Image (tube, coloured by chain):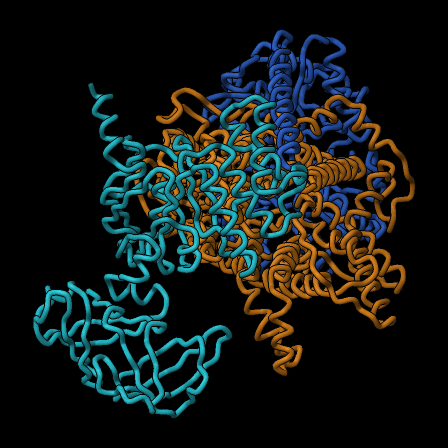
């Protein structure tokens, strides 16, 4: 009978709605325990590890994290400006942090180790501090490119033999790629005071690009599978994929003229609902032990100067040449450069 | 509209219509009108002043004009390809009888319920440049490099056709079932050749169904995001440009592009609306009526038909099979090989034992169920209201109800987040952003049009004199509703609600913008695992989602069958 | 005091009374100024071609539509604005409107459940209603398992189960085949009379209305043309539309010649210029020398073979047979009397062949003057 099934279904719906409302209450009912919400692009593996380590010390804290790209974090903080959800923002380039700081999205906190890092790696008003250094490198697939044939410097990737062999991560959401593109433009800008030369460089790169990939994981995967031979990407990721994700064919090279180094930071969100917890976790992940652990396990180069270098992997202590970069200019003009690249350069050099 | 007025023989008015009107008005105001207006106003603002500058800029930018053009062009091509696949398929399955036809015909609408994100992931695994198929072909033909790349127009059209042809398949099938077979026979007896019968008799009658399918395909394609993101290559489309502009923090541009996209979609909707297609679609999507099919008698033809069906079904199922395979792949065992080299249950055990991972599934279920239930209740309100002939603004309500459906998911999420992210005149200090409820609300808004249409369609099929009979027998408003109207529209309403539920389960594009830890849905978990290169876990989540969807469909089919006894 | 007045009103007025009811849909005037009175226990018909407003009138009585103006009184009470579900009328729909999701028992019990009767009482009354339509034993059947006639009877049982104050029928027999229709209509009338119910019956079938109803209102274009008993309507139609609608009629255009006796008038037909005497007092009021319509039923025309020597007598015309068509019990003969076309209906057509010359007699007392 129709009516019977309707009655059953209605009963089902009502009872499930009832149960659900209870379930929702149950979720909110746990507010007695201390909570901490972290926005972060650091990836689940590393996050879960650190959260577990943190909870072994502070089991009473319910740590939740939202794992997303750094630009998405920024967009979210903007959207939630009037009702902040996050307590801590862990991970993004210092440029992104500075933008957020200027938009008054971060709250000042001076960590206990504030004087243990170079002044350039922190905000003068304590709104963010640097945690890791992220060198940007040339990555290649050793099955397709012998180390001696790999590009040695930035300009080498423009060579015609890499035509259709380069994979580049979509720079719009990526701090690393924005910085690399910015650095390339800056190389010309500092002499000509114009982005034209840099645009030209990017055009020649575009001519060699096989695909702009959606995210870092696909970039690494496609590179390892030989869809492209070389790429530009950050070094810690290459290590992670090489050592932990089984993509052993990946290798990298420092550009000989100097590599770009991004400062990865951490900050407390303005209006954080659990500011105390945020600070505690802040201190935890930037402690010497945590930084050393991150260096050993996740290939993150610590910025703090008071770390026992002997504890770090040997390769971290090998010196590399840093490239000079006008970060302020990038922060001011980067958006426009990227817009221009997106509209006028991307994909227009093919045929 | 004629069909509605048939229904509207209003009984002498009772006050419940006032309450109904109030409910409908409030939800539309808060859910549709205010957010849309806000979005529109924001696109007209720059630096605190009203200006058309944003539009001027958009219209001057070559990349954006290209994106607009390519979006439309891609959608048109998608419609074409989907029609080419879906219509013949519907003819095959509706008009002929051959072994295993039933199974194939059910399988054929499978992509309809495959969440776009899961589909995309499966496609990458399967046909990507270094996916299973490409590798297999490469090994087989001993090629030096991959035989194809899953990028650009070809890839986009392939994926769009795969995911959207069911619109044509389902609607054409429903249309064919409605057409009187006698008409074709009459035409044949008048000496018309089969081709002539097809073009002069059958196709003209199918036109409404075909137009409805075209509209659905067009709009879905305009709003398609995952596919251009992953397979687009250099193809610029609006959804992607909006995404990139947002990522660059270029909010005014993103907003303006959003409005351009919304206007195109709404334009298409209004243009096609008189064909009233979506209602038919939902009503037809899950219902089958028995009809005499022509058995294929010749042995060879039977074998060929069954074989075609089998090949086709395997093609359809391949992405899902791939997903299944990858979900058992050991972490790190599938990098450069054609097939994963080692298998394990680890991925599943990880999901099913970790509290976090399980809660993701529970969240999705909970939110989709909430959204679907409210959508059902709401559509009963709307349908009751709109079916009254005397009501002014009936058509406006119908159109407003459809607006969230015409807008891409990103747009709905952004407009809701913009509108309810700060104290505003409508809600006072209540802020939705950052709460658990934002996702159920968005799911509700995005998918309630499907339910409304389903309920409306059922209501139109109902003989209005039934309710009049109930009234004349002394049944008051509520009794009439519960004992007559509800049982009669139940199958259609259930089908629509279920479709909304199933689609909400896999929702990604809107969720990604506004989810919070308390409501992290399964689609976000899949994306996160993909980002961390945990392909096996991502695939396992995908499989669990598919299983959930299959389960809900089965339950609904049971309910519906039970109700027909 | 007021009760007292109401009581007297009720005594004076009929059971159901429609007073100047009008209803329009947009620009269409569906019902125009309709008034009618139905007595208690009467089987009242609304007869008219489709689209004449009879169904709309019925629906307003049922409360399914609200009249734009006018009032509906039942037993002295104004029910114009009373909701359908509070009127307590039984209604039988053209489509039967049986609830497809309920079985026969539940369909019949529907109105009783709405009245919150006890299970026992419901069971008793359903059984009673079903036995009245001879459907006992069908309680558990689904309505779609029944034949058209059975469905129809379920619809009737459902309507009478609530012991309605008024029973409304909206062309309930039009979906049945001819034989079943005739059988059912006899049963229906018997049932309504046995239960002493008052019924309002809408139909477009003249024969059906005549067989069923005590009195009938003929409607056209939203108005009531004439109300009367079936016999009265048939024999004395007052209007050309009524005459045309109720069976076949010879319509003759004619001009009144002189004011002769009070009980008869002389007319000259426009076609054929025959002089006719019409034995009725109605003619006295007609203006002279103005065309008007006369009507005579085909069965009232008398035919004589030419050999008969009476061709010059009163109301007798010479005519030629143009066609003879046999229809079983009767035969229709078409005639041409110097340009005046006539139709006669004969029971015994022997000796009349196409082309033959005959004498036609139009009995004066059978000729009707129409308005």
Q: Nearer the viewer, residue B473 or A118?
A: B473
The quarter holding residue B532 reads top right
Q: Give the farthest residue toward the front.
A: C309
Say above or below: A350 vs B254: below
Residue A226 in the image: x percent, y percent?
80, 52
Residue C288 in the image: x percent, y percent?
8, 72
Horizontal side of residue A208 vs B420, given as left or right? right
Say above or below: B357 vs B39: above
Colour of chain C in the image: cyan
The quarter holding residue C109 reads top right
Q: Nearer the viewer, residue A185 or B287?
A: B287
Residue depicted at x 35% and y 58%: C48
Residue B236 in the image: x percent, y percent?
56, 55
Residue B536 in the image: x percent, y percent?
81, 38
Q: Give the farthest residue toward the right.
A: B342
Horizontal side of residue B388 vs A196, given as left or right? left
Query: In this orientation, does residue B241 appear?
Result: no
Residue depicted at x 82% and y 50%: A148
Query: In this orientation, does residue C338 appear?
Result: yes
Q: Quadrant of the N terminus of chain C?
A: top left
Residue depicted at x 48% and y 76%: C327
Say above or below: B462 vs B419: below
Image chain in orange: B
Q: Quadrant of the C terminus of chain C?
A: bottom left
Horizontal side of residue B310 vs B478, given as left or right? right
Q: Nearer the viewer, residue C322 or B130?
A: C322
Colour of chain A in the image: blue
């Amino acid at each position: 009978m129709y009516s019977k099934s309707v009655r059953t279904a209605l009963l089902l719906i009502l009872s499930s709605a009832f149960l659900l409302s209870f379930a929702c209450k149950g979720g909110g009912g746990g507010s007695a325990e201390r909570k901490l919400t972290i926005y972060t692009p650091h990836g689940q593996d590393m996050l879960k590890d650190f959260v577990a380590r943190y909870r072994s010390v502070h089991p009473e804290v319910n740590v939740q994290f939202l794992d997303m790209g750094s630009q998405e974090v920024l967009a979210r903080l903007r959207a939630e400006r009037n009702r902040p959800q996050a307590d801590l923002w862990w991970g993004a380039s210092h440029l992104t942090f500075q933008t957020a700081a200027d938009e008054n999205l971060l709250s000042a906190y001076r960590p206990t180790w504030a004087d243990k890092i170079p002044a350039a790696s922190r905000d003068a008003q304590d709104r963010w501090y640097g945690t890791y250094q992220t060198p940007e490198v040339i990555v290649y697939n050793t099955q397709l490119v012998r180390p001696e044939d790999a590009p040695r410097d930035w300009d080498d990737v423009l060579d015609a033999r890499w035509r259709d062999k380069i994979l580049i991560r979509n720079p719009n959401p990526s701090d690393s790629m924005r910085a690399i593109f910015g650095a390339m433009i800056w190389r010309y800008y500092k002499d000509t005071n114009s982005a034209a030369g840099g645009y030209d460089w990017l055009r020649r790169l575009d001519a060699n690009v096989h695909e702009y990939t959606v995210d870092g994981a696909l970039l690494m995967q496609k590179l390892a599978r030989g869809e492209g031979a070389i790429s530009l990407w950050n070094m810690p990721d290459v290590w992670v994929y090489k050592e932990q994700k089984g993509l052993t064919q990946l290798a990298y090279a420092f550009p000989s003229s100097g590599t770009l180094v991004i400062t990865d930071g951490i900050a407390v969100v303005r209006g954080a609902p659990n500011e105390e917890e945020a600070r505690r976790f802040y201190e935890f992940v930037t402690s010497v032990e945590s930084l050393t652990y991150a260096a050993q396990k996740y290939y993150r180069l610590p910025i703090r100067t008071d770390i026992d270098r002997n504890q770090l992997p040997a390769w971290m202590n090998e010196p590399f040449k840093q490239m000079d970069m006008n970060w302020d200019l990038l922060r001011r003009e980067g958006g426009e450069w990227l817009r221009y690249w997106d509209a006028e350069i991307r994909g227009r050099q093919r045929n | 509209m004629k069909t509605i007025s048939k229904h509207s023989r209003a009984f002498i008015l009772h006050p419940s219509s006032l309450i109904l009107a109030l409910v409908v008005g409030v939800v539309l105001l808060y859910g549709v009108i205010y957010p849309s207006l806000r979005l529109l106003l924001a696109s007209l603002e720059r630096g605190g002043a009203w200006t058309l500058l944003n539009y001027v800029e958009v219209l001057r930018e070559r990349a954006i004009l290209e994106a607009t053009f390519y979006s439309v062009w891609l959608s048109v091509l998608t419609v074409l390809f989907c029609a080419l696949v879906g219509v013949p398929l519907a003819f095959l399955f509706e008009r002929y009888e051959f072994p295993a036809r039933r199974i194939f015909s059910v399988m054929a609408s499978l992509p309809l319920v495959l969440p776009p994100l899961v589909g995309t992931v499966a496609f990458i695994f399967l046909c990507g440049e270094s996916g299973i198929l490409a590798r297999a072909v490469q090994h087989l033909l001993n090629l030096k490099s991959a035989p194809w790349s899953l990028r650009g127009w070809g890839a986009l059209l392939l994926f769009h056709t795969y995911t959207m042809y069911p619109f044509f398949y389902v609607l054409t099938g429903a249309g064919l079932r409605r057409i009187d077979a006698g008409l074709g026979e009459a035409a044949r007896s008048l000496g018309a050749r089969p081709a002539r019968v097809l073009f002069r008799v059958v196709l003209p009658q199918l036109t409404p169904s075909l137009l409805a399918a075209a509209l659905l395909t067009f709009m879905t394609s305009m709003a398609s995001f995952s596919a251009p993101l992953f397979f687009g290559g250099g193809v610029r489309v609006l959804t992607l440009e909006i995404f990139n502009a947002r990522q660059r923090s270029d909010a005014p541009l993103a907003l303006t592009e959003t409005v351009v996209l919304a206007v195109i979609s709404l334009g298409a909707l209004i243009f096609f609306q008189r064909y009233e297609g979506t209602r038919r679609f939902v009503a037809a999507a899950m219902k089958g009526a028995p009809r005499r099919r022509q058995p294929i008698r010749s042995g060879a033809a039977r074998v060929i038909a069954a074989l075609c069906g089998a090949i086709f079904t395997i093609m359809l199922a391949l992405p899902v099979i791939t997903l299944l395979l990858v979900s058992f792949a050991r972490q790190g065992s599938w990098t450069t090989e054609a097939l994963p080299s080692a298998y394990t249950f680890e991925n599943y055990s990880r999901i099913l034992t970790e509290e976090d991972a399980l809660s993701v599934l529970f969240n999705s279920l909970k939110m989709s169920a909430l959204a679907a239930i409210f959508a059902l209740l709401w559509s009963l309100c709307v349908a009751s209201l709109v079916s009254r002939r005397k009501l002014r603004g009936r058509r406006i309500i119908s159109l407003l109800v459809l607006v969230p459906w015409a807008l891409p998911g990103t747009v709905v999420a952004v407009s809701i987040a913009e509108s309810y992210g700060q104290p505003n005149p409508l809600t006072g200090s209540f802020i939705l952003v950052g709460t658990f409820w934002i996702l159920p609300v968005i799911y509700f808004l995005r998918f309630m049009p499907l339910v409304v249409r389903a309920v409306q369609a059922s209501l139109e099929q109902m003989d209005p004199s039934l309710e009049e009979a109930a009234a004349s027998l002394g049944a008051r408003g509520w009794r009439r509703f519960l004992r007559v109207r509800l049982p009669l529209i139940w199958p259609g309403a259930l089908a629509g609600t279920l479709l909304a539920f199933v689609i909400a389960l896999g929702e990604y594009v809107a969720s990604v913008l506004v989810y919070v830890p308390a409501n992290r849905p399964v689609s976000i978990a899949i994306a996160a695992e993909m980002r961390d290169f945990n392909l096996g876990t991502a695939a396992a989540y995908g499989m669990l989602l598919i299983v959930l969807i299959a389960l809900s469909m089965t339950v609904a089919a049971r309910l519906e069958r039970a109700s027909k006894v | 005091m007021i009760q007292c007045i109401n009581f007297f009103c009720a005594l004076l007025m009929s059971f159901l009374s429609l007073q100047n009811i009008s209803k329009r849909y947009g620009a269409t005037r569906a019902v125009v100024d309709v008034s009618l009175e139905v007595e208690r226990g009467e089987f009242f018909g609304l007869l008219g071609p489709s689209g004449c407003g009879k169904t709309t009138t019925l629906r307003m009585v049922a409360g399914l539509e609200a009249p734009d103006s006018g009032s509906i009184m039942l037993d002295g009470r104004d029910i114009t604005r009373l909701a359908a579900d509070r009127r307590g009328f039984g209604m039988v729909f053209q489509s039967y409107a049986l609830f497809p999701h309920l079985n026969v028992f539940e369909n019949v019990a529907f109105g009783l459940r709405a009245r919150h009767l006890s299970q026992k009482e419901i069971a008793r009354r359903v059984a009673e209603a079903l036995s009245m339509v001879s459907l006992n034993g069908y309680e558990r059947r689904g309505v779609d398992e029944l034949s058209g006639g059975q469905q129809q009877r379920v619809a009737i049982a459902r309507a009478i189960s609530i012991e309605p104050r008024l029973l409304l029928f909206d062309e309930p027999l039009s979906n049945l085949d001819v034989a079943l229709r005739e059988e059912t209509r006899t049963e229906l009338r018997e049932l309504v009379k046995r239960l002493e119910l008052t019924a309002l019956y809408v139909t477009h079938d003249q024969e059906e209305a005549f067989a069923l109803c005590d009195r009938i209102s003929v409607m056209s274009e939203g108005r009531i043309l004439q109300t009367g008993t079936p016999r009265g309507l048939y024999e004395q139609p007052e209007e050309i539309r009524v005459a045309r609608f109720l069976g076949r009629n010879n319509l003759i255009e004619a001009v009144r010649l002189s004011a002769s006796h009070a009980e008869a008038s002389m007319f000259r037909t426009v076609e054929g210029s025959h002089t006719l005497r019409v034995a009725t007092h109605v003619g006295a009021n007609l203006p002279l020398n103005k065309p008007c319509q006369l009507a005579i039923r085909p069965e009232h025309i008398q035919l004589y073979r030419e050999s008969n020597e009476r061709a010059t007598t009163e109301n007798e015309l010479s005519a030629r047979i143009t066609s003879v068509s046999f229809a079983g019990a009767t035969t229709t003969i078409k005639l041409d009397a110097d340009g005046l076309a006539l139709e006669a209906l004969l029971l015994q057509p022997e000796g009349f062949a196409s082309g033959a010359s005959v004498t036609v007699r139009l009995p004066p007392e059978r000729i009707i003057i129409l308005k």
